[in-house]
Amino acid sequence: MATIFSQIIDGDIPARIVYEDETTVAFLDANPLSPGHTLVIPKEEYERLNDVPDDIASDLYATIHELVPVVEDSVDADASTVAFNNGEAAGQEVPHVHCHIVPRFEGDGGGPIHAVAGDAPDLADRELDDIAAEIESRV
Ligand code: 5GP
């Protein structure tokens, strides 16, 4: 079963498409968190960020890079929150990688990205060292 986003790409579900190239497409979110809330996706279905092949990841970033200032300017935003919900536990509902560009405005009442993960843990230096070493050893 094609994801809802693939159905948009195929023209089976209407959407306000604002950009399209060979490998990526962008359209307005149907339930915008702010005016101009835009989703940028690869045309091929990949569930999570790490499933996206390198060349498509570059294309995706290039589209995000191009669109962020355009979206901000189009709605006269002061800034934007640009983020992926990467996996169900992080709030991803549509299993087709998508970047949210959410225009932000001074005094809009929203929070920073630091607010998304619940209570911040109190990690000791040794735990931070272990985590950093673990990540570094896997790259
Ligand atoms: P997620 O929670 O997976 O990161 O975000 C999915 C986003 O897709 C939500 O912000 C939701 O409003 C948007 N969305 C879901 N269905 C549709 C649709 O049919 N059309 C459009 N344009 N956006 C959709």
Image (cartoon, helix red, strand yellow):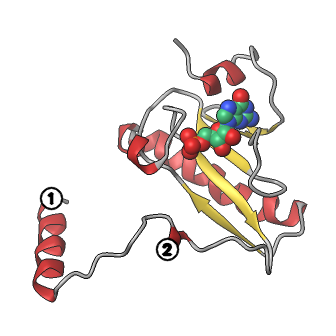
Label 1 crowd (10 A; few <14 / some 14-19 / many >=20): few
- Residue 24 visible in this rendered orientation of the protein: yes
**Type of amino acid at the residue the image marks with label 1:** Arg
Of the two numbered discs 2 and 1 in the rendering, the one whose residue sits closer to the viewer = 2
First-in-chain label (2 vs 1): 2
The residue indicated by pointer 1 is 138
The residue indicated by pointer 2 is 114
Using residue 50 as the reference point, say whether residue 20 is left or right of it: right
Which quadrant would residue 12 be assigned to in this image? Answer: top right
Which quadrant would residue 94 be assigned to in this image? Answer: top right
**Type of amino acid at the residue the image marks with label 2:** His
Label 2 crowd (10 A; few <14 / some 14-19 / many >=20): few
Discs 2, 1 touching: Cβ within 8 Å = no
Considering every residue shown, the one lying at the far front of the view is 119
Residue drawn at point x = 13 percent, y = 78 percent: 127
Which disc, if any, is residue 103? none
State which image quarter holds ligand 1.
top right
Q: Position of residue 37 (x, y in %)?
A: 75, 52
Residue drawn at point x = 26 percent, y = 82 percent: 122
Asked which secondary structure carries label 2, the reply is helix
Q: Is residue 16 above or below residue 113?
A: above
Q: CA distance from mark 2 to mark 1?
A: 25 Å
Using residue 25 as the reference point, say whether residue 116 is left or right of it: left
Residue drawn at point x = 11 percent, y = 64 percent: 137
